[in-house]
Amino acid sequence: MADPLSLVASILGVTQLAAKLTCLGYGYISGVKRAPDDLMDLMNELLALSRVLSILQVYADSNSNAANSALYQLNGANNSPLQVCSQALEKLLRRMEPKDGFKGFISNMKWPLEEKETTQHIARIERHKTLFMFALQADQISLSKVIELYTENIDAAMQTIQADINFMNNTVKEVKMEIGRTNSMVRKTNDTVHDTSTSLSNLSIKSMEEFMAQKFWRDKQYTQDMVNTRNQFLCWVYPGNFSERHLRITEARQRNTGGWLMRTPSFRNFVHDNIRPSLLWGYGIPGVGKTFLSSSVIDYLHDRATTTSEKYTVAYFYFDYKQQEEQGPTAVLGSLVKQLASHVLPLPKEIEDIYQRNLNANKRLSLEELYSVLTLLFSLFNRVFLVFDALDECHPERQRKPLLPLFHRMGEDGASIFFTSRQHPEDIQESFHNIEKIELLADEEDIKAYTSEKIEGTPRIKRLVHQGKCKDEILSEVTACSKGM
């Protein structure tokens, strides 16, 4: 069976041979005086063959699936019509081509074929042309038969469709009659429904109100259960009151002081640059007001957390040398967990599971378990700030030794931490030698504000100072005396 591409290639090859012969023939006609008539007949026959071949090529291109057609029998097997035609044209080409190429063609412009030989070639070309035309006509006849058969099938299908349409028409008539009967029943039912709806409308409204009330009660009860569970966990993880000391310090702190610290580049970078680890150590001599500055930082960060659109939170711990026994590492982490968890509702399931498992076993959380809960809470916020005041008042072995590595871990796990302490403890210096530092000094404006508040708040001193008109001098002397603190 012939390949469609092979058939098109064979037709194209024969067409090219015919075109080459035609060009040679016209060369002879233009160069030979009184060209013989049989040469003109040969050219006409070659042109006719070329036109038939062009039609065959177009038909083969557009009917590549008709592999069993007469057209495809022209190629494929040995001595097929296209091969025989190609051989005949090649034989004629060898006779017509000059022996010495183009030079011999110019020098010897003589028609090389005798009249009898030319007539034979014309006859062969005409036979091939006629055979190709018959193949083309046979394909067209086959196509007509296929179309006729297809038309008969369409007629049969149309008759079947018409029968189905008639059946459907009868069915539609029956359905319309049934619809009429149903409509009558629907009208009667609608009347009944209307009467029933009127009776039920008030009942439905009342039922909906009861449903919404029950839903509101369930939601409220669910929320209350979550709050109760969280509060029980908070009291269990750290029984103490973490905010009591901060409130006392804040009340004792002079208003509008400490703002200088928040304006320093180191503190601004600490707050605004979320770089891990983010640790800032504020150190100063005793009496400089480090604890008051810590409370100012805590309030500043609380205000920032409530005004920003990002999810910030703050936790803190005030160390006190008088309470070293109550401020061990587990108490510190427990206080931080309590502060952060108080902003979370509901508690994550992982924390509830840890709580219930240890509560049932009558166990307290270990230091590592507390740290795991703490880092889980870190992940619930965009930013977590921690403030630790008076780190130098911890016991160096029982408190600072386990806590200092934990502080660095917290920084690596996402917390931003501010510390205050005296400078001299060597373990603090060693642990914080690579973190950002800021020296805490007595600010002149803070001293003036504090001294002025004390003068104005004591009637006798206020009267004496105003009589002596020496308030400015007193403020200047006090400020001068505080330098170096």
Image: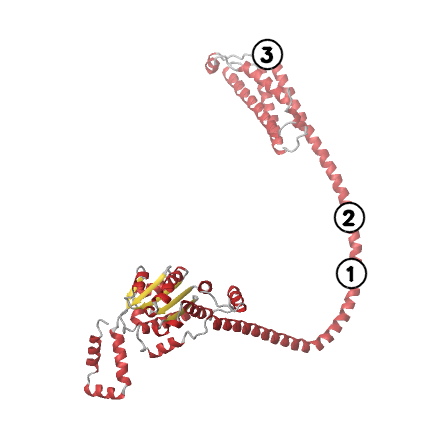
> Which sits in the foreground, 399 or 356?
399
Quadrant containing the N terminus is top right
Q: Nearer the viewer, mark 2 or mark 3?
A: 2
Query: Can you tell which quarter of the image residue 122 is in?
Result: top right
Q: Which residue is mark 3?
A: 115
Q: Which mark is residue 33?
A: none
Residue 162: assigned label: 2
The x and y percentages for residue 424 are 27, 66
User: Three-letter amino acid code at disc 3?
Assistant: Glu
Disc on the earlier residue, 2 or 3: 3
Q: Quadrant of the C terminus?
A: bottom left
Answer left or right for 200 relative to 438. right
- Is residue 219 visible in this depiction of the protein? yes
The label nearer to you, 1 versus 3, is 1
For the residues labelled 2 and 3, the Cα–Cα distance comes to 70 Å
Q: Is residue 126 left or right of residue 396?
A: right
Residue 17: x, y in percent?
Answer: 56, 21
Based on the displayed image, in which of its 4 quarters is residue 245 positioned?
bottom left
Q: Secondary structure at mark 1?
A: helix
Q: Does the rendering let one see residue 308?
A: no
